[in-house]
Image (tube, rainbow, N blue to C red):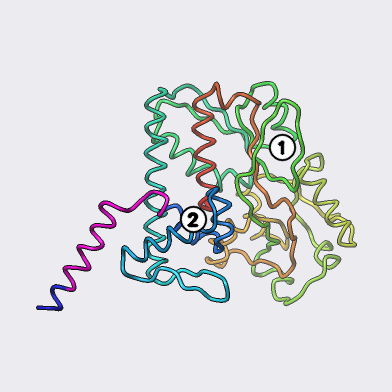
Amino acid sequence: MSENYNLYSSAAQEEGFFGQRLKIQHLRILAALARLKLVTKVADALAITQPAVSKQLAEMEHSLGIAIIVRERNRLFLTPAGKRLAQHAQAVLDQLKRAELELDAVRFGVSGDLRIGTVASLAAVMLPQAIATLKQNAPDVSVSVTEGHFRELLPKLLNGAIDIAIARTWHEQEIAGVAQRPLASEPLCVVADPGHPLARRDHLEWDEVTQWPWILPDQDSIARQELDAFFTRNGTRSPRNVITSLSLQLNLALLREMPVITLFPRSMTRPHIARGEMVELPIRVDALLFETRCFWRIGQDKSNATLNLLLRNLDELGANGG
């Protein structure tokens, strides 16, 4: 009898917390702690004080009657229960964000054309989910996507041929009349076919790697110029045996057909490596072209509701690592 009563009391206690005392801020703190690991970073991200973070965590533990954090050497870690709760918190926050975007689309009657420019390596990474969410919330919007390197996209952005450009960068630089912000950070990987002679090596130097054929961006692109500068910084010449291509499908096919080397975003390498179609060579490119940024004409996000909705979708994906 007492065991059943304890179970009932525990269930009633949790129902009271989830039904009445749970706050959005509780969810935000849990999700942020799971993502950022440190209370100081959580406080900064949510623009609250560290004591406020600790107080909210203590409130949750007291109400739930279960430990959700553990302290080790002045650091906080989520317990297994805390991790599960943080996963639910993130799911709820994601659902609320989707509801906000959907209601905004209805309220502002989002429609019309949206023209997106992107570099090829990001087209399949950042855009599919962002466009799918946009179309779900604003089905009357017509979306077109143009691929190219940033030097091709920037003039189109400035003259209004496209509404937004998404590209990889290695440092921020101001562009007159253009607003920009970072979306995500992701390293590039040096990859080759599993049958490539270098694939069996445990360690490589850059002067060895650049002796082989490479697939690289166009000579006039900003990405290619940064790559050339990167090779110089590492004490070697840029590859001389080069195929210039922006086509990911062609690049994948070339990897299979010849001993060629190229760069791929880490997220794109994972499925190919898992299927045995590609290997990452044991050499690092550090922060080379690691940041994804979006660019739009100043003020367009205020006057173009469709662009504003896409920017918010992209922000959400970037925050969740998508």
Q: Residue at x 68, y 62 (%)?
A: 191
Instruction: Say which mark, if any, is on residue 52.
Output: 2
Identify which amino acid the numbered label 2 is placed on: Ala
Q: Which residues are magenta?
A: 6-26
Q: Position of residue 7 (x, y in %)?
A: 18, 72
Identify which amino acid the numbered label 1 is placed on: Phe
Q: Position of residue 232 (x, y in %)?
A: 89, 56
Query: On the image, which quarter does residue 166 sit in?
Result: top right
Q: Nearer the viewer, mark 1 or mark 2?
A: 2
Quarter of the image with the N terminus is bottom left
Q: Secondary structure at mark 1?
A: helix
Q: Secondary structure at mark 2?
A: helix
Principal SS element in the magenta part?
Answer: helix
Instruction: Say which mark, if any, is on residue 150.
Output: 1
Q: Is residue 137 left or right of residue 265?
A: left
Q: Residue at x 64, y 21 (%)?
A: 160
Q: Which one is in front, 250 or 312?
A: 312
Q: Position of residue 234 (x, y in %)?
A: 86, 61
Q: Position of residue 15 (x, y in %)?
A: 23, 58
